[in-house]
Image: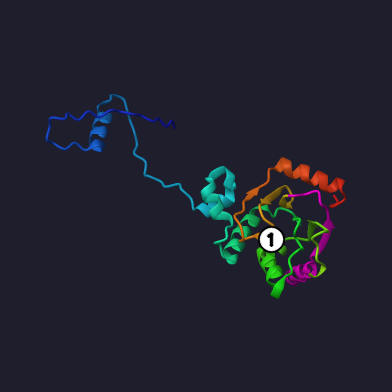
């Protein structure tokens, strides 16, 4: 079947007092064309909910800057809204049993009243059951042992047999979450989510391969 877009000028004489409906006149013109057959298809609204489209395609491809900032994380978002957005992104990147979280400030928070570790665990709780291993790559300069322990304990409460490890490196500036051949770029560390505008987007597959090559070279992960 071939689709054809037509533009047909409808002439309505200015001196007539009779109202001429453009749609009616348009179909009259179509009927007057010999050998032309056509079908009127029902109108389908193919627009999607912004949040669904955002998670499926990544915001830099579909959204203007004004919309994408509001859709990812701003000082006006509640913690539970941020958690739900991340869960939907994770639905699409958890493709293997090993998750790598690269975050310079991963264990820097004081974890007052367990809010920090609880917040992080809520983001990953649904997906921890699918994983066998989580590797954290972070800075030793910003590392706090008690914060690491709180997050470890919280993760293990969700899945007790989960293998957790922390590796130290100052070679990575961006926050990256990698799983198999998929990954996310996150514009803020966990302790900054909801404090300033930040961007979340997918990482190109070729870039993921390059990043993992460097991780292997530095001895931060194993094949």
> Which residue is drawn at the image coordinates 70% and 49% (left, top)?
182
Task: Name the residue nearer the viewer: 95 or 78.
Answer: 78
Q: How is the image coloured?
A: rainbow
Compared with 155, 213 (above or below) is: above
**Secondary structure found at label 1:** helix
Total numbered labels: 1
Q: Which residues are magenta?
A: 147-173
Residue 139: x and y in percent read 80, 57
From the viewer's perspective, is 214 left or right of 82?
right
- Outermost residue on the top side: it is 34
> Which residue is drawn at the image coordinates 24% and 36% (left, top)?
22
Residue 209: x and y in percent read 76, 43
Compared with 1, 159 (above or below) is: below
Q: Is residue 83 magenta?
A: no
Compared with 142, 154 (above or below) is: below
Q: Quadrant of the N terminus?
A: top left
Task: Name the residue nearer the viewer: 74 or 58.
Answer: 74
Q: Is residue 162 magenta?
A: yes
Residue 106: x and y in percent read 75, 60
> Which residue is drawn at the image coordinates 85% and 47% (left, top)?
216
Quarter of the figure with residue 150: bottom right
Residue 213: x and y in percent read 81, 44
Quarter of the figure with residue 31: top left
Mark 1, residue position: 190
From the viewer's perspective, is 93 left or right of 34?
right
């Amino acid at each position: 079947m071939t689709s054809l877009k037509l533009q047909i000028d409808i002439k309505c004489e200015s001196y007539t007092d009779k109202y001429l409906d453009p749609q009616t006149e348009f179909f009259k013109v179509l009927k007057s064309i010999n050998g032309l057959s056509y079908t009127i298809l029902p109108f389908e609204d193919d627009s999607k909910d912004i949040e669904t489209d955002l998670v499926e395609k990544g915001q830099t491809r579909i959204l203007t800057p004004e919309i994408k900032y509001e859709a990812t994380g701003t000082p006006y978002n509640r913690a539970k809204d941020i958690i739900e957005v991340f869960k939907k992104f994770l639905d699409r990147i958890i493709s293997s049993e090993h998750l790598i979280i690269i975050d310079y400030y991963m264990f820097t928070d004081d974890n007052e009243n367990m809010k920090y570790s609880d917040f992080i665990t809520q983001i990953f709780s649904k997906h921890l059951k699918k994983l066998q291993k989580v590797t954290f790559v972070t800075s030793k300069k910003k590392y706090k042992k008690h914060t690491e322990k709180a997050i470890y304990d919280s993760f293990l409460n969700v899945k007790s047999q989960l293998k957790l490890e922390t590796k130290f490196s100052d070679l990575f500036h961006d926050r990256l979450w990698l799983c198999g051949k998929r990954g996310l770029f996150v514009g803020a560390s966990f302790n900054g989510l909801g404090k300033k505008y930040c961007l979340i987007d997918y990482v190109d597959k070729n870039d993921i391969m390059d990043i993992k090559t460097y991780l292997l070279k530095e001895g931060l992960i194993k094949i």
